[in-house]
Image (cartoon, grey):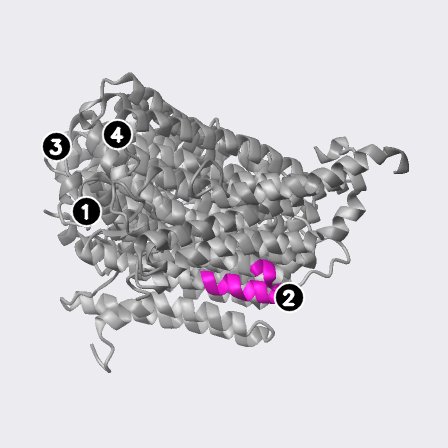
Amino acid sequence: MMNGLTPELALALTLLLPGIGAVLIGAADRFSVLRDAISLLAATALSTMVLALLLNHLAGGSAQIQLTPLVQGLPIFLLTEPIGLVFATLASVLWVVITVYSIGYMRKNDEPRQTRFYICFAIAMACTMGVAFAGNLITLFLFYELLTLSTYPLVVHYETDAARHAGRVYLGVLLSTSILFLLPAIIWTWSLTGTLDFVKGGMLTGKIEGPQAALLFALYLFGTGKAALMPFHRWLPAAMAAPTPVSAFLHAVAVVKAGVFTLLKVGVYIFGTSFLSAMNVGEWMMWVSAFSLIAATIVALRKDDLKLRLAYSTIAQLAYVTLGVSLASVMGMVGGIVQLVAHAFGKITLFMCAGAIYLASGKTKISDMRGLGRVMPFTFGAFLLASLSIIGVPPTGGAWSKWFLMIGAAESGHLVMIGVWILASLLSIAYLIPLAARGFFLPLTGQEDRPQPQGQEVSLIGKPGLQEAPLWCVAPACLTAALSVLIYFAGPAIAGFVLPALRP
Amino acid sequence: MIRQHLAILQVMLPMLCAPLCVFARRPVIAWLIATAATLFALAGSFILFAQALNAGVISYHLGGWAPPWGIEFRLDAANSFVLIIVSLVGAVCMIYGRDSIPREIKSSDQPLFYTMMMLCFSGMLGVTSTGDAFNLFVFLEIFSLSSYVLVAMGAGSDRRALTAAFTYLLLGTIGATFFVIGLGFIYVLTGTLNMADIAVRIAGMSGSGTLHVGFAFIIVGIGLKLAIFPLHLWLPNAYTHAPSVVTALLAGTSTKVALYALLRMLYTVFSPDLPFEALILHYLFLPLGLTAVFVASIIALFQSDVKRLLAWSSIAQSGYFLLGVSFANIGGLTATLVHMFNHAIMKSSLFLAVGCVVYRTGSCSVASFRGLGQKMPWTMSAFVIGGLSMIGVPATVGFVSKWYLVLAALERGWWPVAFAIVAGSLLALFYFGRVIEAAYLQPSPENSAVTEAPVSMLAPLWALTISCLALGINSELTVSTARAAAEALLAPHAGLPAHMGP
Amino acid sequence: MKHHLILLMAAKLMIPPILLFALYVQFHGDYGPGGGFQAGVIFASAFILYGLVFGLDELRRVAPLSAVTKLMAAGWGLYIGVGYAGVATGGMFLDYGRLSSDPIAGQHTGIFLVELGVGMAVASTMLAIYQCFAAHQSRELTDDEW
């Protein structure tokens, strides 16, 4: 790479830049413009670094950093590999977008404790990078836990009783699952194999078999509480107590994706797809995931609070990935990775739109939102596009992930799972589309349409004059909505990028 | 010359400083003497540890009488490791005490307080250093008697310290009596008091009833000092009502020293290969350890006083020690020793942080922590880090402890135990969560003028906090040291002179 | 106090022999039964008798608590000092055979000093305990304090 920027330095900077950003943000506490500028700068610099690493990888290079041993024989180890790069790129690019959005949102809403908000955000970002580039399981676990802790202040941001309760559920579920299940699973793996490095093709072959392997797999799946597999999903709706930018980014992208990313890494590099399918390890977990998928979708249908409905939708969408991993086929894993990307763009758009609606109209309940599309066409337009991506309608990114996942199901012979996905997609139409449709086609609450005389119909859209949220909030949402359409065209490229790591 | 006599000097220098403190006219001079002695002991313990690790066992013959006839100070990797723990926590507490002690003890009593600190300190070092079982009893009593007085000195601010000290005195004395009775049985059987010598002589006597009875008395005696569940009843009150510095010192060292004595008895004098000991380890220590972890943690959940909460947490932690001991393998022993060191660091730092809060607010109820996150940011962030370490979050020493304990349980194939260990540490999340939530998420009471604690208290506190993080990120040092110590404990005959060999 | 004349006279007569006997037990400890512990207690008992008969204030005048405390520390210090003397003369800690050129004489000197230290410490501790208890203004602990 050029200008003395070695890949190792770039890798180190991905963790250091958000950290330095956090310190500078704290220092600029009193100058709100400077503070916001630093946030934006840190985000941009980080995504530049990650893109540099991505280009470096495409050019055939790689980078790794080895630090002190956390416990004997297990160093803190950072490494660039395809799946991690995909996740890091996704997270760092979306950080820039969400920072723009946060600035608009936090200022318009005149939120308290903004400096702490940006500091924690930056630290959470550093932890996310640590998760993405972790070269062994213990490093992943380290940053996974730190990510939980650094997002806790964001969940309790408002410091009300409700926020405190949400914080308790958040920390309680995430730390409990990781300490109770994930940590023993990691130590078990370590005592079986004597290594926790991510090895291509997995390393458990011949070390464990039968029900024990299934148990270990279940420990990993339930232990990764961030993947919100039922019954350990309660933290995600609770986390909606945070300001919307946090829900949009951390709890729709960084944190939950760190969860499913961990599962993908474990599935690909610890178990290995061939071992998983040969031992039929995921048999039980497949059904648990399928249940989680359908159940969360049904719950989402019944929620009237927009953020909560989106949260349950996230739980369902995460179960897509868990199911993909449990299927133990290469295409299932690919589908999981593409889902990670497509869902991130779709869901962040939906949350940003929810925040924009709240900013412009103060409404959080879906039943109150009819007709709003007429005054907020851009927001609702973005919402509609993103909904299509979540449902999986071409030409949006979500179409590819469903496609690969279904191929994966066919590959592994679990055809019934295809049915599950189809059912879930149909149901997601039911909980997402009405919102946009009612927004556009019904009149605003309190302004009932009078029957118009024949021949004098007026356009339903744009009539009462625009009442959009601030530009800083709407523009990012439109951008990500557009990107989630673009992902449709990038889908095969992403699959092609990660396939070499998956094929043994 | 100092180097040659270091093994004895580092016990006897604090012992000499004890009477000197009585003659100090001003409290600050007594403080200086005491602090200098602890720092000397700290430096000495590092030198001794290096020596024991590199050049083998150090044997010092008191009065020039060779063992097994005379008293011997016998330092191997295990007890010189414990020396470091004791003198490190002691030194940190003494430095911290400069501002904290005048606040809690009236100035006419302060020289006597430092005298007692020195006696307690040298007693603990003596228990750790000696190779003679009866001498161990003597030092155990020196340190116990002085710690009763230290606890009672909390009466200056809270007269409940007197009843707490009295309970501690009664149970501690019963413990000491049991220990010495047990020792009597062993002496009747073997005719020797040198621990290495006893180990050689009882090798073929595993069927002897005298041995069984002696073993039982010794274990119960030490168990009282260590506050093994259900012999823990003296501990919560003693820790709660003692002056802050004393609590930090006792929590960091006294149970560790008692644990060392237990390990020495279980692994060096007796051996897990003896059938009756194997039974005790498996059928008594394992269930008691598990019960302690859960019962004490659950009781801690309901405490409204933070010092008492931490005291119950200490009892829960002694459950982890018992678990590690009951594994009876090198992994379990290493885990116990690692946890011993780590727990000393984190629990002392937590008690020191609470001491800072007491210094400023005069109370340590959970309610008095409200809003301190903003008012005392350094104190509270140290408390948070200590709490995270107790929970076992990675990059803290607590994680390293949990890791090795779980690993040792898995090595034995004891699945449920491994699960119980992590489940127990999770309970810590709930009881620390309450305090931390109060500190950061609840507004401070109206018109409270609390400010940050003085630097002289924050510096020692943060020294421990930083080592808590640093040794959590790089545990190579602690673990390799603990492993060497575990090996030393399991090799009672190493470095014995020919006439004492098996 | 006048009407306790017999008591007063008896005490005055008894105290010097008690002190003398204490010193005998102390210094004969090398050869026969006795030693610092017993001697210290006997020595202190003379003072306690004095305190019982003449009152606590009088005892405090003869043996103030501050002086007693210092004596306690001095006895303790003497013992440790003998230990250090062994190191200072090139031997091991407590190696008091080296206090004289003849090891046997050295042993005598050493144990003599050690016992003296013990005697001082024990006597003053007994006195201190008596004074503290006697001076105690009894106050019922309230339920709250238990």
Place residue A405 in its image quadrant. top left
Above or below: residue B433 compared with residue A424: below
Give the letter of the chain under mark 4: A
What residue sits right under mark 4 in the picture? A215
Residue B462 seen from this side: yes
Badge 2: how crowded within 10 Å, few (<14), some, or many (20+)? Answer: some
Mark 2 vs mark 4: tell me if same chain.
no
Residue B29 included in the magenta stretch of the image = yes
Residue at mark 1 to residue at mark 2: CA–CA distance: 67 Å
Mark 2 vs mark 3: tell me if same chain.
no
Mark closer to the observer (3, 4): 4
Mark closer to the observer (4, 1): 4
Badge count: 4
Q: Which mark is residue B151?
A: none
Q: Which residues are magenta?
A: B21-37
Relative side of B142 to A283, left or right = right
Would you say the magenta stretch is mainly helix, strand or loop?
A: helix
Residue at mark 3 to residue at mark 4: CA–CA distance: 16 Å
Residue at mark 2 to residue at mark 3: CA–CA distance: 78 Å
What residue sits right under mark 1 in the picture? A269
Give the letter of the chain under mark 2: B
Residue A2 included in the magenta stretch of the image = no
Place residue A51 in its image quadrant. bottom left
Q: Residue visible at 21% across and 40% down?
A: B492
What residue sits right under mark 2 in the picture? B26
Q: Which mark is residue A278?
A: 3
Q: Residue visible at 39% across and 51% down?
A: C108
